[in-house]
Amino acid sequence: MNGDIRSQRRRPTWLGPAILILPAFAVVFSIAAYSAFSLFQLSTVDLTFGEPFRLAEGVGLQNYQWLLTNEHSTFGATVRITIHYLLGTLIPELLIGFAIALLLNRKMRGNSLFTALLIIPVVLMPSMVGLIGRLYFSYDGLINFFFESVTGVRHNWYGKDLALVAVILVDIWEWTPFFILILLAGLQTLPVEPFEAARVDGASRWQSFAHLTLPMMLPLILTTLILRFMDVLRLFDVIFVMFSGGPGTATTTLPLYVYRTTLVQRDVGRGSAASVMLIIIIVALTVILIKLRERIKFEA
Amino acid sequence: MKVKNRGALLGSRILDLLTIAVVAAFLFPYLFMVSSAFKTRLETFAYPPVWLFTPTFEHFENIFDNMNILFYMKNSTIIAVCSTLLTILIAIPATYSFARYRFRYKEGVAYGFLFLQMVPGISIVFALFFIARALNLFDTHIFLIVVYLLWNIPYAIWMMRGFVEGIPVELEESAMVDGASRFKAFRLITLPLMAGGVAATAILIFIGVWNEFSLAFFLTSTNARTMPTTIAFFMTHSGIKWGPMFATATIGTLPVVIFALLVRRYFISALTFGAVKG
């Protein structure tokens, strides 16, 4: 091993790095390729879950066609619910998270302890978070207790009107600290000089926030949003444990749709086709967002 | 002037209290859950909620004596430890290569890893289910250990790359000038310096595997079942067994919370794939 790497200077320069990357590359890409191949194969057959694979009947791309065009397909509705879920979580999480990050960004005793404690919601077991949510949002639960104390009414969070809101509120509790922690780290590394100059020039607090803090924080805000966007779009466990996509289809986001089609309706073909589309949606939108962020970075 | 100062002081006190209130609000659901693990069934369902009660340990006794929770903890530990160690072992050379060499398509390959990391577990879990069946590896530790590598290795590479790039390359070069081989320079100089970052990465991967639900849930039944997926046992036809479930959640989240607080210095890098330093 020693000799190999030492003498790599006389060999083509790509050989050394290639040998070092090879194990990681081989493991990751072979698992990915094997799964991708199987997934695509499953998405082109008609197969009931539980039946042996040899009974699968090839149907070409009909599963995709059915999902996208058939009048009984709820794929479109699922996409709509997913968009509601995305907007309902990301926007409040960003706004509340940024506000709290600004609040924490000042000298105060115990500040580092507080930020450390905010890690806790982020690292809890999602399945357990789902169960906590299920109990707290029950009719006799904690959330209704607070609601009744303030507004005098209790709500049926398990109903189809509010189930998605309940799931969103759980996500906001769990993941707002993510925005707080990252944005606070960003705020603490901002240069001091521009703010001092602005104060000398008589800028108000609001002006220096709008013209200095916000533009300087924009790239980081976008990075954080992209990371959360990917995570929200693939979130399965919390919703599965809380309502498993129900009642009806009220909380059936795309990952839940994949599960319900494959295991509840036992339609492996359409479930796999939906999986492929979920992967394409995530990768495509993330690439677009990364490009967008780069463009904004250059303009700023 | 004096009045203004007093006003500023008061304002800052109010902000202090607000900060404490905000942090308390985020911790409250967790602490209430932990406290519920020590409540009787009646107290858990009391409306309005019970705040003061005599703690009971019956649920903890129950999960250890009747639900065999140690077995699932053991499975979780085996899978998380093995997958983490394998990940680090495989990722370190690749990380070094990305951090220290210049070669064509480097960023392309790095982003290739990142994109694979983005694939949702739920979208390939049923394909993996068929693969596991075909290979006779359904419900085994080894299958989960290997499958998790798909997400862990890219994550480790992106995390650790930043740590290696933060170590001046001159240190290694001067060792090589003194006659050390490139590998020896790495082992004696860079590796000890990146040890903290490697440990933090390992802990964060451990937490991820320990908490992972969708793959573990659909790729195991009894033999390799992990802690997070035991929730199915608590959702019975006669309702949810809240007490034992909260006791399990308390025990299952405790190591994670402790670990996370230990590596809090690295946490910002962890959340952003090394894109932002804390």
Image: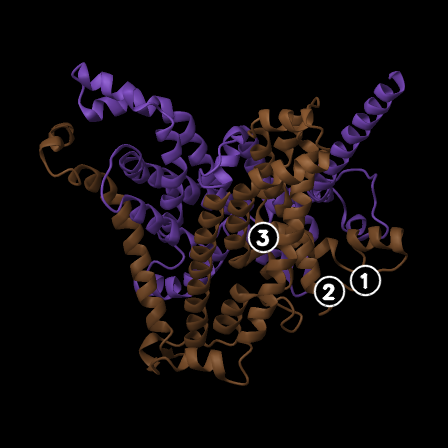
Q: Which comes sooner in the sequence, label 1 or label 2? A: 1
**Outermost residue toward the top?**
B178
Please give the name of the residue rendered at 43% of the width and 63% of the height, measured from the top-left corner: A279
Q: CA distance from mark 1 to mark 2?
A: 8 Å
Percent x, y of residue B264: 54, 31
Q: Check if mark 2's residue and mark 3's residue have beta carbons within 8 Å.
A: no
- Callout 1 secondary element: loop
Q: Quadrant of residue A86?
A: bottom right
Q: Quadrant of residue A109?
A: top right
The disc placed on residue A155 is 1
Up-down: is B267 above or below A51?
A: above
**Outermost residue toward the front?**
A201
Q: Relative to residue B99, is residue A261 drawn left or right?
A: right
User: How crowded is the residue under tag 3: few (<14 C-alpha within 10 Å), some, or many (20+)?
Assistant: many
| Residue linked to disc 3 | A127
Please give the name of the residue rendered at 28% of the width and 49% of the height, measured from the top-left corner: A27
Q: Quadrant of the N terminus of chain A?
A: top left
| Residue linked to disc 2 | A162
Query: In this structure image, what is the colour of chain A?
Result: brown
Query: In this structure image, what is the colour of chain B?
Result: purple
Q: Amino acid at mark 3?
A: Ser
> Looking at the image, is mark 2 or mark 3 nearer the viewer?
2
Q: Amino acid at mark 1?
A: His
Q: Check if mark 3's residue and mark 1's residue have beta carbons within 8 Å.
A: no
The answer to whether residue B241 is visible is no
User: How crowded is the residue under tag 2: few (<14 C-alpha within 10 Å), some, or many (20+)?
Assistant: some
